[in-house]
Amino acid sequence: MRTSYAVEYHVVYRYRRAVRLGPHRLSMRPRETSTQRVVEAALTLQPAGHTTWTVDELGNSIALVEFDAPADRLEIRLQTVVEAIVGEEASWPRQHRNDKLASEQNSFREIGRAHV
């Protein structure tokens, strides 16, 4: 069975006076897996910034943001819609990975015995 849910991240930083905002690395987007995918995503920044999306070595979506002008407030909002597979349908990929891992561990044990 498939289901969808909305995830919203919203944070506001306020400063006593205008400050220069350095580069930001935002890791807020839900991770996509074999049982979950991001259907919609909208990042809103106030003040606006130059945003570049990338993926890190662990598969996380990262927004790299640079701001042009000083600001006395920074607002970050990420709204996403995620589709997930739940129930029996969601269990098979996990079981498959566990079976594969157990098989690889057994192979390592056999190799270890052969060289002892």
Image (cartoon, rainbow, N blue to C red):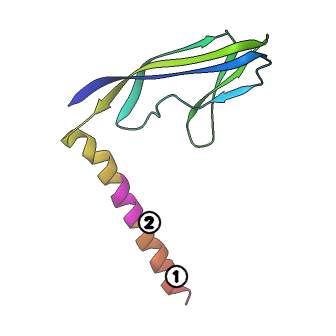
User: What residue is at 76 percent from the left and 20 percent from the top?
Assistant: 21
Q: Residues within 10 Å of mark 2 (few under 14, many from 20)?
A: few
- Quadrant position of residue 58: top right
Would residue 71 appear left or right of 75 to someone viewing this image? right
Q: Is residue 81 magenta?
A: no
Element type where label 2 sits in the image: helix
Would residue 84 appear left or right of 10 to someone viewing this image? left
Residue situated in front as seen by the camera: 18 or 82: 18
User: What residue is at 38 percent from the left and 38 percent from the top?
Assistant: 34
Residue situated in front as seen by the camera: 39 or 45: 45
Q: Say which amino acid is labelled 1.
A: Gly
Q: Say which amino acid is labelled 2.
A: Glu
How far across and how far down the image is residue 66, in percent? 74, 19
Would residue 17 appear left or right of 37 to someone viewing this image? right
Q: Is residue 98 magenta?
A: yes
Q: Which residues are magenta?
A: 97-102
- Quadrant position of residue 16: top right
Q: CA distance from mark 2 to mark 1?
A: 12 Å
Marking on residue 112: 1
Query: Where is mark 2, residue-wise?
Result: 104
Disc on the earlier residue, 2 or 1 = 2
Q: Residues within 10 Å of mark 1 (few under 14, many from 20)?
A: few
How far across and how far down the image is residue 116, in percent? 55, 90
Element type where label 1 sits in the image: helix
User: What residue is at 49 percent from the left and 73 percent from the top?
Assistant: 108
How far across and how far down the image is residue 65, in percent? 70, 21
Q: Is residue 60 above or below residue 15?
A: below
